[in-house]
Amino acid sequence: MNPMDHISIILVNYNSAELTKMCLKSLQNIRAKDFSYCVIIVDNASQKLLKLPKSLQADHVEVIRSESNLGFSGGNNLGITYAAEHYNPDYICLLNNDTTVEPNFLEHLYNYIKDKKPGCMVTPKIYFAKGFEYHKEAYPKAELGNVIWYAGGSIDWPNLIAFHRGVDEIDRGHLDVTSLTDFCTGCCILISREVLETVGMLDDKLFLYYEDADLSLRAGKKGFQVLYCPDAVIWHHNAGSSGGAGSPLHTYYQTRNRVFIGLKYGSPRVKLTAVSYALRTLMNGNPVERKAVTHALTGKMGKQPYDKI
């Protein structure tokens, strides 16, 4: 009999203890018939040390601490490295701490990719958490919590935009087909060990945002499948730990890394588009956007001090 596969679930906590506890509470109910799992919470230089109540403590749950803010990429990389050293996992599941999960989400993801060789990465269907929809007033109250945040991803190279399929749409079952996706969202990805061993971890230069697209593109270039599995379902409290969509932090990293990805992976025409977009932004953008494209063009990547953004 083959030994049971192991999945290490990585959560990154940054000044968002209540969200992390909410996520961990939902993880208490997950089903794990054919695999073992652990949860590794990376407390990413939060101002207050993360302390879990006894009701959330368990042998398979660990909290590790970084004394500096490593961002989404670095925080997850620390968790992946810790998992590799202590659990030797067959799969890594990156999961945002501002999510709640359906009990069988991980079983669905695991069952879908466990026999795929040489490995792949897969992401679930993700809804806005109830009341966290962008336009919650526009939906019938009965549909709140049933509005799609992600049902696969596409990259519109001519416009340098990575977007979520189905975003803001009420789920009518119209996106329930398992399919290839241009990128898995870092909100939740189950990644085969072979992928990480071949293409490496998340790119620390990105720090926050687009690191999921970068990892997906690297995996795809190496021949790994990048997949969307609608049978697996979670809910997302959108931008719960980054100040929210439209905040200076969100705007800076989204803008800078968007240009970086275009210049790194785009065709010659796309690279020209990236430069053109950057020049237009320098002329017409707000101060945060201008700083972001300047840094992208000059190679000033990685973490930038928040008070300088």
Image: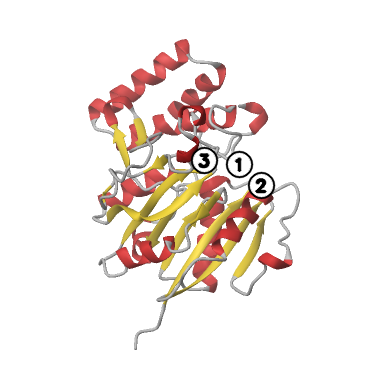
Residue at the extreme right:
48
Q: Residue at x 53, y 39 (%)?
A: 238
Q: Are marks 2 and 1 in contact (CB under 8 Å)?
A: yes
Front-most of residues 282 and 55 = 55
- Asked which secondary structure carries label 3, the reply is loop
Could you say which quadrant of the image residue 174 lies in? top left
Q: Nearer the viewer, residue 289 or 4?
A: 4
Find disc 3 in the rendering and name its residue: 208
Q: Percent from the top left, x then y, of residue 300?
A: 51, 32
Q: Amino acid at mark 1?
A: Ser
Q: Is residue 59 above or below residue 14?
A: below
Q: Disc 3, disc 1: CB below 8 Å?
A: no
Q: On the picture, is 233 further left or further right than 111?
A: right
Q: Quadrant of residue 250?
A: top right
Q: Nearer the viewer, mark 3 or mark 2?
A: 2
Question: Where is residue 217 drawn, in percent x and y?
Answer: 32, 46
For residue 16, the mark is 2
Q: Position of residue 161 (x, y in %)?
A: 35, 30
* Distance from the alpha carbon under mark 3 to that under mark 1: 11 Å
Q: Which of the pair 261/24 is nearer the observer?
A: 24
> Which residue does the image show at 37% across and 63% down from the upper left?
108
Question: Which amino acid lies under the numbered mark 3 shown in the image of this protein?
Answer: Leu
Whichever of labels 3 and 1 marks the residue nearer the N terminus, that label is 3
Whichever of callouts 2 and 1 sits on the residue coming sooner in the sequence is: 2
What amino acid is labelled 2 in the image?
Ser
Q: In the rendered image, which residue does mark 1 sit on?
A: 241
- Give SS at disc 1: loop
